[in-house]
Image (spheres, rainbow, N blue to C red):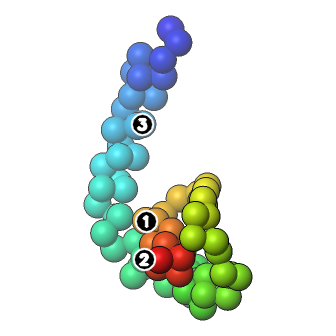
């Protein structure tokens, strides 16, 4: 048994988490404002990136940080 999806409990958990985020992803940024306050301003303060910059964001959320960073290098 090498694959977590072969474990019934893990499979059910994965399904539940996927359903939760499918519901919450569209409203995540609007409803987490107290945690995300100042994020856009902070991202704008990141020094200029070269045109071929590669960015790795490790975390969770909607990807809004990456969209903002892409706008800065485009």
Q: Is residue 3 visible?
A: yes
Residue 23 rendering spot, x and y as whole percentages: 29, 60
Residue depicted at 58% across the width and 79% down the height:
35
The tag earlier along the polypeptide, 3 or 2, is 3
In the shown orientation, is residue 15 left or right of residue 40? left
| Pointers 3 and 2 in contact (C-beta within 8 Å) | no
According to the picture, the residue beneath numbered tag 1 turns out to be 62
Tell me if residue 2 comes above or below residue 48 in the rendering: above
Q: How many C-alpha atoms fall within 10 Å of the one at disc 3: few (<14), some, or many (≥20)?
A: few
Q: Position of residue 36 (x, y in %)?
A: 56, 80
Q: Which residue is mark 3?
A: 13
What number is the disc on residue 29? 2
Question: Circles 1 and 2: CB distance less than 8 Å?
Answer: yes
Which disc, if any, is residue 33?
A: none
Q: Is disc 2 surrounded by few (<14), some (14 to 19) or many (20+) residues within 10 Å? A: some
In this rendering, the answer to whether 32 lies above or below 25 is below
């Amino acid at each position: 048994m090498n694959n977590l999806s072969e474990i019934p409990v893990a499979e059910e958990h994965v399904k539940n988490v996927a359903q939760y985020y499918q519901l919450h992803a569209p409203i995540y940024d609007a409803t987490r404002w107290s945690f995300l306050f100042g994020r856009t301003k902070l991202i704008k303060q990141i020094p200029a990136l070269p045109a071929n910059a590669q960015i790795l964001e490790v975390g969770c959320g909607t990807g809004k940080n990456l969209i903002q960073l892409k706008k800065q290098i485009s």
